Amino acid sequence: MTKLRIILAGGGTGGHIFPLIAVSQALRELSAQRGLVLDARYFGGAHDYSGALAENDIRFVSIISSKLRRYASAANFLDIPKFFLGLLQSLWKVYWFMPDAVFSKGGPGALSVILACKFYMVPIIIQESDSVPGQTNVISGKLAKKIFLAFASAADYFDNSKVSVVGNPVRQDLAVAANNTEEARLAAKKKLDLADNIPVLMVMGGSQGARRLNEFMLENLNSLIGEFQIVHQTGEGEYESFFQEYSALTKDWSEEVKKRYRFKAFWENELKDVYLAADLVVARAGAGTIFELAVFGRPAVLVPLPEAAGDHQTKNAYEYSNTGAALVIEQKNFLGNLVLDRLARLARDPGLLRQMSEAARKFYRPEAARQIAEGILSLLK
């Protein structure tokens, strides 16, 4: 059988890796229908997700990552030489693989791979998940043959003749698990040892965590567990310090009270159950998180990261909230009494939660991964 060689490139976070995996799964299925064997390799930095790549038959090829900044920073003195080292690596490693196409999500490390592929005249396809594209994708878009977008507003930054708005690919295990029946919700609560009759609040800051959300939880945990059962993702980098502060805060709490609050660095295998069990979600506004909320139809309060490049999380959050699926509380307003009151009001208004849930599900585009995969294959001889 003929082998189809595809390079996947991205920034190495869950927001890049999981959509790339979703597209590779769709590519593998479509390739098999055409009598092709897919050889997909991820070029970039993804050490935290190398296991997830391997599980999906994607070989990890390490490329030095560097960040493109739109502002002056001392870190540029390190990243500029790292970029050229990454470019030399990419030229060498792309040559020996010589792919049929490259599909990039953008982010640190992806541009050197894109430039190497352009040098070898490899077709370039990119996807932009956010409403404001990152610098890597702005540059890559000028070289790309096809550009896929999650948010229609991002089209202003690209050549519209290349653009298709398809949504954001959601990892297959979550998309398949997004069963919104009451039986599925009850089964998920039972699996997580949560009570049926107390609202479940999910708090997450993405795979890397969110310090302000974690601080808010510690400051207001006593009040929150009076209203909710809570499942909280702290993020890998924040977990140790959070655990120490939590242990000191709750040293006199009974086990019965502690049972109403669960936290982990990363809800990996249980993530689908956490989403199914949740009645309400507090989260950052990365594109990956927003489309996961949409696939599960979960009402949300979004707290965009103000330092995000191009303030894209704020723009993501407001574009999504305009559908009626979420409320936005900017970080400067993310204060104890205001947030506690807002969460309590939402939890006590089942009619509004239903409306938000329906709006979220309407926002989701289930064919995103397949449409991108078909777009990649359409460019190949």
Image: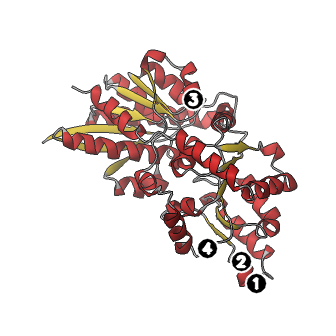
Whole-angstrom CA distance, mark 4 to mark 3, is 39 Å
Whole-angstrom CA distance, mark 2 to mark 1, is 6 Å
Residue 270 seen anywhere in this rendered image of the structure: no
For mark 4, give the secondary structure: loop
- Viewer-nearest of discs 2 and 3: 2
Q: Compare marks 1 and 3 and give the one earlier in the sequence.
A: 3
- The amino acid sitting under disc 1 is Ser
Tell me the residue at 38%/34% (across/down).
372
Say above or below: 114 vs 8: above
Rendered-image quadrant of the C terminus: top left
Q: Which disc, if any, is residue 258? A: 2
Rendered-image quadrant of the N terminus: top left
> Which residue is at the far left?
1
Q: Which disc, if any, is residue 254? A: 1
Report the front residue among 92 and 46.
46
**Rendering coords of residue 230 (x, y %):** 68, 66
Is there CB contact under 8 Å for labels 2 and 3?
A: no
Say above or below: 273 vs 48: below
Task: Specify whether 217 is left or right of 109.
Answer: right
Whole-angstrom CA distance, mark 1 to mark 3, is 48 Å
Q: Compare marks 2 and 4 and give the one earlier in the sequence.
A: 4
Residue 40 seen anywhere in this rendered image of the structure: yes
Q: Which disc, if any, is residue 194? A: 4
